[in-house]
Image: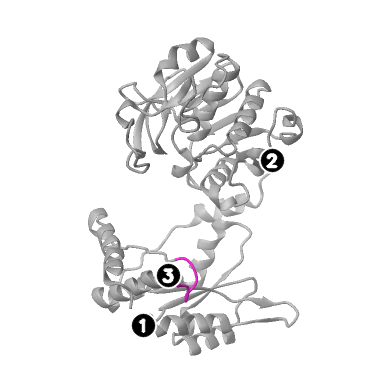
Amino acid sequence: QVIPHITNAIKEKVYSVAEEQEVDVVITEIGGTVGDIESQPFLEAIRQIKYEAGEDSTCFIHVTLVPFLGKAGELKTKPTQHSVKELRSIGIQPDIIVCRSEKELSDSIKTKIGLFCNIESNCVIQNLDASELYEVPLMLHKEGLDSLVCDKLGIKERSIDNVQWIQMVDNLKSLKKEVNIALVGKYVELHDAYISVVEALKHGGLTNDSKVNVKWINAEDVTRENGDKIFENCHGILVPGGFGDRGIEGKLEAIRYARINKIPFLGICLGMQCSVIEFSRNVLNLQGANSSEINSETKYPVIDLMNEQVGLDDLGGTMRLGAYPCVLEKESMSYSCYKEEVISERHRHRYEFNNEYKEALIEAGMSITGTSPDGKLVEIVEIKDHPWYVAVQFHPELKSRPNNPHP
């Protein structure tokens, strides 16, 4: 038996979302594999939620893999059957099964899965591999997934207008231009670590009829000597967010390369802080300038904690999290994109631009083009004698959408 305190906490979290946000439907995803010990408390919690909320107020959708054996030329349903058997043993009966596969599921395969998993065959949905992520909603709609969910939850189904979405997917497959963007980070082996950034780049590329090719560069591999080789054929350099000191020097070199060689550059969160450090070291000549997060003994802490945070040890509790307003300077690259004087962007960081170095950086050629409404917190820095050099403390990628890209 799972300790009730754990399952109660999970249930309270799910219920609180519904109550606080005043939503009609709460979607809760449980990752991992059925049978793994890590998922047991969560599965038990949703079993109890169905018992408490009622049969007509919950819908269990189970996503499984139906592998295709090339040599045998057949799809295997056994993994799905065993997965559902495991779920049923703990009291969860899937209402709908979404089957990921590289080959189409025949009616006989759907009937077989339905028979052995105790659901109607029309509740077995195929989810074929797609060349573009944004094809998936269209494929699931064609299979009738949305109708099944609405029917199960007693929600009145409405007609949808997906013409724009279909057009967007068609455009994604026929982009006429290409652009190469170097993404310099320390988690590049796991591409999903930067999925929001990459998708936001794709959204911008789509609007400009350009396919964005991301060149993944490990920050630890970048040195002053190999910049020409590493950034060969790159039309832009992006340094995304992150934490910790690993790879910092490589990020600084990437930013220096972009600044000197007039390559379009975008820094996000830690990338913005690194741009300030690089400029301080190589333009202001403040040797050893750093963030106090990386080197607490640095002589020039151009990135530092705010005064009210000094002495606090709780990393999460001292973070600036969520949406905050930012006031833009009208004569700036950022304003030319947003075309608004006050914007709102999401944050996730602890350290800030140190205002003690503000005047020196401005005199040396770095522009501060975005601040908090009271002017105390620096949000955006730019270099004006550069084709495109913008570094932001916030995370613009989190607000980008495929048919409505971020500015």
Q: Of the residues under marks 3 and 2, which one precedes in the sequence? A: 3
Instruction: Name which residue type carries label 1.
Output: Gly
| Number of other residues with Cα within 10 Å of mark 1, as a class: few under 14, some 14 to 19, many 20 or more | some
Residue 177: which numbered mark, if any?
Answer: 2
Which residue is at 33% across, 30% downward? Answer: 310
Q: Of the residues under marks 1 and 2, which one precedes in the sequence? A: 1
Q: Between tags 3 and 2, which lies in front?
A: 3
In the image, residue 379 above or below residue 91 = above
Where is residue 210 drawn, in percent x and y?
A: 64, 41
Secondary structure type for disc 2: strand
Q: Which residues are magenta?
A: 31-39
In the image, residue 29 above or below residue 240 = below
Residue 145 included in the magenta stretch of the image: no
Secondary structure type for disc 1: loop
Asked if labels 2 and 1 touch by Cβ distance under 8 angstroms, the answer is: no
Q: Which of 129/273 is in front? A: 273
Which residue is at 47% across, 72% downward? Answer: 144
Toward the top, the furthest residue is 363
Instruction: Name which residue type carries label 2.
Output: Lys
Circle 1 is placed at which residue position? Answer: 91
Q: Between tags 1 and 2, which lies in front?
A: 1
Which quarter of the figure has residue 148?
bottom left
| Number of other residues with Cα within 10 Å of mark 2, as a class: few under 14, some 14 to 19, many 20 or more | few
In the image, residue 309 above or below residue 54 = above
Q: Which of 356/74 is in front? A: 356
Secondary structure type for disc 3: helix
Asked if labels 2 and 3 touch by Cβ distance under 8 angstroms, the answer is: no
Where is residue 326 drawn, in percent x and y?
A: 37, 28
Examine the residues drawn in magenta and state their main secondary structure.
loop
Circle 3 is placed at which residue position? Answer: 39
